[in-house]
Image: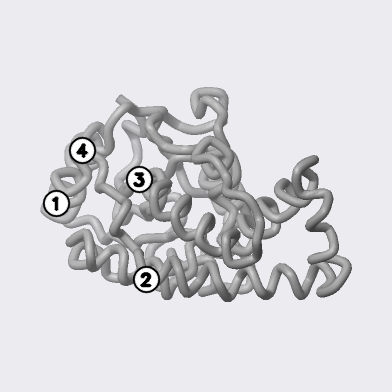
Amino acid sequence: MFFQSTQFKAALVDLDGTMVDTLGDFEVALNRALADLDLPPVTRALVERTVGKGSEHLIRSVLAYQLALPEVKDLTRVCEKHGMDNLYEAAWLRYQNHYLAINGEFATVYPGVVEALQQMQDAGLQLACLTNKPLSFAKPLLQAKGLDSFFTHVFGGDSFERKKPDPLPLLKTCEALGVQPAQTLMVGDSSNDAQAARAAGCPVVLVRYGYNHGEPVDGVDADAHVDALTHVAQALASKA
């Protein structure tokens, strides 16, 4: 199927858009935070185009979009009064509170994910969850969805100095697992995962059902593009 000559020892698995569909959580938490600031709600389509580079980037992008809307012209006084950075801080604090209150409530595990993780674990592969989501969001979500027991390590967007698409999180996670990047597969859903993997020297597989900033993922450079996580698990199990 792919990576036929590689003997893998570990897999790094992204969270949002790869294991769990969290658009509902993002949409609800964002809109509650925006309502607190008297700003109009965002659509799920906008959230899908914006997620993936960390919650801080998500908040800044949504605020910039909202404040550019014609109907928000009279609300630019919010920025004038507080400044963009202070507005961001206000939105970020409200978003964190709302997100933690509903974390996982409007999210669903993609079909085949539990089966795939079990197959990888049974094959003797070390598994780490590597996400740009803040660690304080990621760990409770994995636990709520019954996925936490599969991973020896969980690292979030605030675990290291830089986030994906920088290769640092992948290199640090490989180091924590005691494996070489060339023997570690990155499994994700976006160009962030692919670019980070290429720079780190990890093979990479992308699932087609994820977000990828609203763009088709087949156009992203990767070793393979698959329709289900079970396809990856089956290939990995055959090489383990």
Question: Looking at the image, is mark 2 or mark 4 earlier in the sequence?
Answer: 2
Q: Are marks 1 and 2 in contact (CB under 8 Å)?
A: no
Q: Residue 193 vs residue 148: left or right?
A: right
User: The N terminus is located in which quarter?
Assistant: top left
Q: CA distance from mark 3 to mark 4?
A: 10 Å
Residue under label 4 = 111
Question: Looking at the image, is mark 3 or mark 1 earlier in the sequence?
Answer: 3
Number of the label disc, if any, that sits on residue 19: none
Q: Is residue 139 above or below residue 206?
A: below
Residue under label 3 = 21
Q: Amino acid at mark 3?
A: Asp
Q: Is residue 61 above or below residue 159?
A: above
Which residue sits at x=32%, y=52%? 106
Question: Looking at the image, is mark 4 or mark 1 earlier in the sequence?
Answer: 4
Q: Amino acid at mark 2?
A: Ala
Residue under label 1 = 118
Number of the label disc, if any, that sits on residue 101: 2
User: In terms of secondary structure, where does tag 2 sit?
Assistant: helix
Question: Looking at the image, is mark 3 or mark 4 earlier in the sequence?
Answer: 3
* Closer to the camera in the image, 225 or 54: 54
The x, y position of residue 200, in whole percent, is 56, 53
Camera-side mark, 3 or 4: 3
User: In terms of secondary structure, where does tag 3 sit?
Assistant: strand
Camera-side mark, 2 or 3: 2
Q: Is residue 170 visible?
A: no
Q: Are marks 2 and 4 in contact (CB under 8 Å)?
A: no
User: In terms of secondary structure, where does tag 4 sit?
Assistant: loop
Q: CA distance from mark 1 to mark 2?
A: 29 Å
Q: Residue 71 vs residue 16: left or right?
A: right
Q: Amino acid at mark 4?
A: Pro
Camera-side mark, 3 or 1: 3
